[in-house]
Amino acid sequence: MTNVLLILADDLGYSDVAPFGGEIETPALDALATDGARFSQFYNTARCSPSRASLLTGLHPHQTGIGVLTRPDLAHGYPGDLDPDSATLAEILHGAGWQTWMAGKWHLSSTTHTPTGSWPTRRGFDRFFGTIRGCSSYFEPQTLFRDEAPAHDAIDDPDFYYTDAISDEAVRWVSDNGGTADAAPFFLYVAYTAPHWPLHARAEDIERYAGTYLPGWDSLRAQRLGRLVEKGILPAGTSLSPRDPSQPEWDDVDDKEWQASRMAVYAAQVDRMDQGIGRIIAALKETGQYDDTLIMFLSDNGGSSEELPIGDWESFRRKDEVLQKDATRSGQPIRVGNTPDIVPGDEATYSSYGIPWANLSNTPFRRYKRWVHEGGISTPLIVHWTDGGVRANQVIHASGQLVDVLPTVLDAVGIEGHPGLQGRSLLPALRGDELRDEPLFWEHVGNAAIREGDWKLVRAYPADWELYNLRSDRAELHDRRDEHPEIARTLEDKWRSWADAVGVIPWDDMAERYVLAGLSAAAAEE
C-alpha cells in the first residue's frame, strides 16, 4: 500500500526554488523534479488558510468555512473554522487504515490555545507536532503543540529552530514507524512555515547567500525568466512583467547591502527547508519506502509583499505573544520593521522582505499573495512516485489547482472519492496521458478569477474585470476584454454561477458589515 508525503511551503514564490528557475540552492527538490514531474500551470488559492483548507478537503475554501482566514467573521460571514462536514484527507486515509501524521503549521482553527473539533488531532491525524496559528518567531513559535499538549521544545533547547524541528519530527516518524513488513502505510503532511516572515534563519545558511543578491532585483528577475524558459517551464517569448511600479530601479536604490541581506535571509529559510526535505527523503530511502511513496511539494500562495508591521503597531503586536513580551528568550529587545538599521536574520529581529523581493519570487508574474493574478496563485508543484508510473523529468503544462490534490491521492491509493469533490485526479497527466480540461475558479477578499482553456478573466477588487490569453500572455500584460467582450461575459456568468454554488459572500457585503459594526472595511481582509 502506497505512502503519501505532502509537503507545503508557506509564502514561497513561483520561481524561488531551483527546479523552477531560482538561484536558491534546493538539491532535494532538484532531485525530486529530475526523477519526477513539474507542473508549470498549477494554482493555489492566494492565501494561507484558504489554501490549506482546499488542499486537505478537495473543496473550494468557501465550502469549508475558511473564506478568508481563521478569524470568526461577523454575523453571516465565514466561520473561520474548518467545517466538521468537510472530510479531510487525513480522516479519509485514517479510516482506510493509514497512519496519519502532521508536522508544522495548521492554521485552520479559530481557537488556537484550547483543543477544539477543528484541531488536527480531531480531524484525522494520529500525531501532530506544530503550531495552530499562522506565523510567529522561528526561534520561539507560539501555539506550539505536540498532539494536544503545549510543547516546550523552544524553551528547553536554546538551539531550537522551527524549520529543523518540523523536519526532525517527520524524520523520526518515518524512521520509527515505517518500512517493516507489518507496518501500516502512512500519510505524512509536512507544513513548513518557511519562508513566511519573520526573516529568521541560521547564521551559516545566511552566510552562503552573502553577496548573492547584490546584483539586484532587476537583473535577477531577468535571469530567473531565462532559466524558466531553458527548463521548458515557460515557453520562449514569455514576457517579463515590469518591475512593481512602486519600486525603484536597482541602480537607484540606497542601502543596497541591507536590501540584499533581506533576500539573503529569505533564501536561507528556503535552503534550510530543502535540507529538511532531504533528510526526510533519506529516511524514506533508508527504510525502503522511497519508491512507493507519493511525494507532492507545493506552496500555499505566491510571494508576500507584506511590509512589517502590518497596520498599526499596537494591533500587530497584540496578535503575537512573542512581540507582546518585547524580548527574546535571552532578554534581547526585539526590533520590528523593515528599515536599514534592522539587519534581519536573528531572533532579536522581526522583518519581512517586502514588495521588491516578492516581485522577484513571483517572476515573471505581477501581483502577490492575496491577489488572484498569476503572481498570487501560481505555485511550483513537484510530484514524485517511482512505483506509481510518474514519468521522470517531465514538465506538465496542463492546468490544475488545489482541489485536484485530494482526488489525485485517493486515485493513487485506490480509494473512491465522495461525490462532492470539486477537482479531478492528476494521475493521467503524471503518467503521460491527456488531462481533461476543467474551468478553474478563485475568490479571495473580493479578488476573483476564472480560467477556462487559455482564457483567464480576473479582477483586483474593486477594479473592473480584465481578460487575458495565457497561452500568449502568461504575465497578464495585455487586457483583451475590449477585443473579446463576448468571451468576458461568458466567463463572468460562469464565475457568478460558481460563486453562488460554493457560497462566496459578495465582498461589498462583507465590507459593509464591518463598517456597520464600527470597524474599517479593511478589517474584513485581516
Image (tube, rainbow, N blue to C red):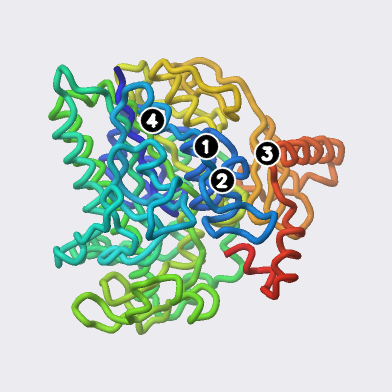
Q: Is residue 406 above or below residue 78?
A: above
Q: Are marks 2 and 4 in contact (CB under 8 Å)?
A: no
Q: Dot 4: what SS?
A: strand
Mark 2 crowd level (few <14, some 14–19, many ≥20, 10 Å Cα): many
Identify the mark nearer the N-term, 2 or 1: 2
Marks 2 and 4, the one that precedes in the sequence = 2
Q: Which mark is residue 402?
A: 1
Q: Position of residue 239 (x, y in %)?
A: 59, 47
Q: Give 510 or 280, whichever is nearer the viewer.
A: 510
Residues packed near mark 3 inside 10 Å, few (<14), some (14 to 19) or many (20 plus) = some
Amino acid carrying mark 4 in the image: Val
SS label for mark 1? helix
Q: Which mark is residue 383?
A: 4
Q: Nearer the viewer, mark 1 or mark 3?
A: 3
State the residue in front, 303 or 64.
64
- Do the residues bearing badges 2 and 1 touch, measured as CB atoms within 8 Å? yes
Q: Quadrant of residue 282?
A: top left
Please give the residue where the numbered disc 2 appears in the rendered image.
45
Q: Is residue 369 left or right of residue 257?
A: right
Q: CA distance from mark 2 to mark 3?
A: 14 Å
| Dot 1 or dot 3, earlier in sequence | 1
